[in-house]
Image (cartoon, rainbow, N blue to C red):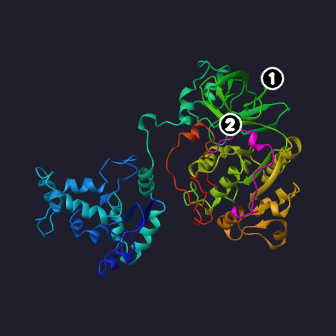
Amino acid sequence: INSIFMYSKFFLTNAYFISAAIQRPALQQVYNLFHPSDPIASRLEPLISAKFSILPPVNIPRYQKYPLGTGQPYYLLEAVQTNPQLFTEHNHARRTSEASILSTVSGIGDTLPIQAINKLTKKWWGSKRLDYALYCPDGLSNFPTNALPHIFHASYWESSDVIAFILRQFAIFDYNNSTGNEEKEMATFSPSQPREKWQRKTTFIKIKNSTASHRANDVIIREGLPQIISARFIYGPFDMFSLAGEKVDIHIIREPGNGEWIHLTTEDSDKNGRVTYTIPENKSLGFGIYPVKMVVRGDHTSVDFLLAIVPPQTEIVVFSIDGSFSASVSVTGRDPKVRPGAVDIVRHWQELGYLIVYITGRPDMQQQRVLSWLSQHNFPHGLVSFADGLSTDFLAHKITYLKSLVQDHKMIIHAAYGSSKDISVYSALDLKPKQIFIIGKVGRKHHSMATVLSDGYAAHLSALQCHGGSRPAQGNARMLLTSRGRFGHNASMRRRRSAKRTTSFPICSMTRSTSRNRYDNL
């Protein structure tokens, strides 16, 4: 173990009264994080050296104000050199204020005895300071004292300040090249054609002061079949206006590695605002996943989606978004919590080489909110399919879509996840009960039709990681150039870089020895 981040507990306070010397742990660095207002919090530094009782702990900067930190010194020697009068042989025993410490720094910088420094570093628990204080809102002073420890302990897991602080201790940032490949891709795209006047005079009047709500499903096509892509262009809330009879430029990245957009063609939208284009045989694409962007010529609004050209016998794992990923209903209706372990389950199958497919019966008008939720909670990359408009039979879209993947595109569904209402969908595809994994409440008559994950995703992931629990993909999914990063569907989603929480908790290190970093309204 290199470093450990721990949150102060009351047992550390008791250590102050133990006469025996505190043993140095077998670690390179210890970080003691606490809230100053926590009644059971305690500091470590004064237990190792009483002189540090005069020095205040290091204040962890607020992430909202200082996302990259303030540059304040964390190392032990920097603290000693900044306050030399505390570590000289004849320092006063009285407790001095921080202001008085700073006023006596000048002129003493080189008077520290080497023996005192060596003695301190030998017993210190790392090369940096140990005590780090978190921001505490003033309003918490009105809470009962006995409730504060529970509130503070729960806040550690959702604190952006804590997450940013931990990452800064290990990450090496290149501030001059902070934009990633996705941002470079956005920066290099520019419409191939300048804006033009609308072809219909009524178009400007209809969409004036209206927000674009364009949408398109990801497209999966087996090699050898016609490569048809489609998108719909809508403006205003509740799909008030369709963009009819206007030019739309279609762009694609044929080589995803270089990020160069190529203009395929220009098409006119139909009366329903839909653009459908069949890629000619002389321009047909090989195996791979290709970003597609359709841009409205009149105002340069656009929609992004993915085109996947797959070989036969490609193995996929299907995840139904509806009810299987969210653990609660948000009070604000915007950000429900993720079921613990949901992100890790998707990541597990992705790392085994399966193509991830997300399906939902929700109408495509909710596409932006759902994709934003998946991106903010770091769900792994996958292809997504929404229902085309409003429908009373929301399961019909799932059945039709999945049957098309199996029958027309010769894909193999290795495993399927969802809630109880998805059992009939997966059973219609002749999936075996051991291939259907259901989370949440399930009626007794359906227990024999699926594998019910009564202990949650975390226990299921532990079983998958055991010997014989799961196998790598044996089909042709590995031939696709799939992204192994977090979920990032389109440009508008990639712009949202906020460090939203994810409640996908890792399980014990015994079962997660090979774990890696993790990647609306559901």
Left-right relation of 88 to 58: left
Quadrant in which the C terminus appears? bottom right
Q: Indicate the amino acid at tag 2.
A: Phe
Q: Find numbered disc 1 in the image and state the secondary structure of the residue it sits on.
A: loop
Does the residue at mark 1 contact the one at mark 2 (Cβ under 8 Å)?
A: no
Q: Indicate the amino acid at tag 1.
A: Pro
Left-right relation of 41 to 451: left
Which residues fall within the magenta stretch? 465-484
- Residue 252 vertical placement versus 360 (above, below): above
Question: Can the viewer see residue 56?
Answer: no
Question: Residue 183 at x, y = what percent?
Answer: 53, 34
Question: Residue 27 at x, y = what percent?
Answer: 42, 63
Q: Tell me which corner region of the image, top left, top right, bottom left or bottom right, holds residue 166.
A: bottom left
- Rendered residue at 72%/21% (across/down): 265
Main SS, magenta region, reads loop
Q: Find numbered disc 2 in the image and state the secondary structure of the residue it sits on.
A: strand
Which is more toward the observer, 517 or 66? 517
Q: Tell me which corner region of the image, top left, top right, bottom left or bottom right, holds residue 238.
A: top right
Task: Give me the disc on residue 305.
Answer: 2
Which is more toward the observer, 284 or 512? 512
- Rendered residue at 62%/54% (across/down): 521
- How many labels were placed on the picture? 2
Q: Distance between the residues labelled 1 and 2?
A: 19 Å
Local crowd at mark 1 within 10 Å, few (<14), some, or many (≥20)?
Answer: few
Question: Can the viewer see residue 504?
Answer: yes
Q: Is residue 119 magenta?
A: no
Task: Give me the disc on residue 280.
Answer: 1
First along the sequence among labels 1 and 2: 1
